[in-house]
Amino acid sequence: MGRMISIASGKGGTGKTTTTANLSIALGKMGYHVCAIDADLTMANLSLVMGIDDAYTTIHDVLAGKATISEAIYATAYENVHLIPASIDWEHVIRADPRKLPETIRELKNKFDYVIIDSPAGLQMDAMNAMLSGEEVLLVTNPEISCVTDTMKVGMVLKKAGLAILGFVLNRYGRSDNDIPPDVAEEVMEIPLLAVIPEDPAVREATLEGVPVVEYKPDSRGAKAYMRLAEKVARISGLKAQVMRK
């Protein structure tokens, strides 16, 4: 059975979509079969980041009852990685019912080793439906106190809801002298710090090129940090969920 991991945060702009794309491709490089889902039903940036911007059938069509989940799965240019894209027009957004998402994507566990869900930020209904579609959660924060505390709150809510919290990613570390140090962020979050992604020009360049950095510049500091994150996720995913079910 595959692992279903929601990527979540307390604020927008922390790098959830970048993390989703790079983690998915890194796991694919390791030989796992991965399906990334763009579950941010109003912003829909994952499709662009992963190079599929002309999809005819999307998660919105599935949630509107106009397509099956299998019809919305697309192969990407990256080895072992598939994508369920989202639509970018408002007409699709208003037709889709986000409450159907958890039940709709559950069957993907039987088809992929990992299902990585790019969720909206915060605790609104659409965000909660996306995050609760996973069984495990990976939190993403920037090294700013307001971002860390908001993301901590999201983690607390999801833990109470029964999800297993794998840990968190401290993203874009080193861009300011005022950044919260990793050990302090871990103390505030009260969950394991799985990766520190450094502020790296290669990540920005990759974003502009529409190619995740683990593929664009695999020897860059950012790409190596994402690969280490994938290795750690592969080691620990499933274990916490199993413990919680006992």
Image: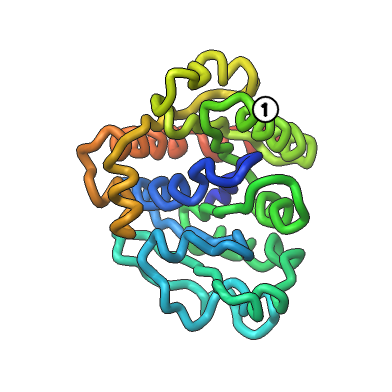
- Give the residue displayed 50% in from the left and 32% down from the top: 169
Amino acid type of the residue that numbered disc 1 sits on in the rendered structure: Thr
According to the picture, the residue beneath numbered tag 1 turns out to be 149
Against 30, residue 46 (above or below) is: below
Left or right? Give the position of 57 relative to 234. Answer: right
Q: Please say whether residue 59 is visible from this viewpoint.
A: yes
- Give the residue displayed 55% in from the left and 69% down from the top: 86
- Give the residue displayed 65% in from the left and 85% down from the top: 66
Against 58, residue 27 (above or below) is: above
Q: Quadrant of residue 69?
A: bottom right
Q: Position of residue 13 (x, y in %)?
A: 54, 45
Q: Nearer the viewer, residue 170 or 241?
A: 170
Against 175, residue 112 (above or below) is: below
Q: Position of residue 179 (x, y in %)?
A: 49, 21
Binning the other alpha carbons within 10 Å of mark 1 as few (below 14), some (14 to 19) or many (20 upward) gives some
Question: In which quadrant of the rendered image does the C terminus lie?
Answer: top right
Number of marks in picture: 1
Q: Nearer the viewer, residue 50 or 237?
A: 50
Q: Quadrant of residue 147?
A: top right
What is the residue that sits farthest to the front in this orientation?
Answer: 177
Against 239, residue 70 (above or below) is: below
- Give the residue displayed 55% in from the left and 72% down from the top: 88
Q: Position of residue 117 (x, y in %)?
A: 56, 54
Q: Please say whether residue 182 is visible from this viewpoint.
A: no
Q: Nearer the viewer, residue 149 or 2?
A: 149
Q: Position of residue 195 (x, y in %)?
A: 44, 29
Left or right? Give the position of 109 relative to 76. Answer: right
Colouring method of the image? rainbow
Q: Secondary structure at mark 1?
A: helix
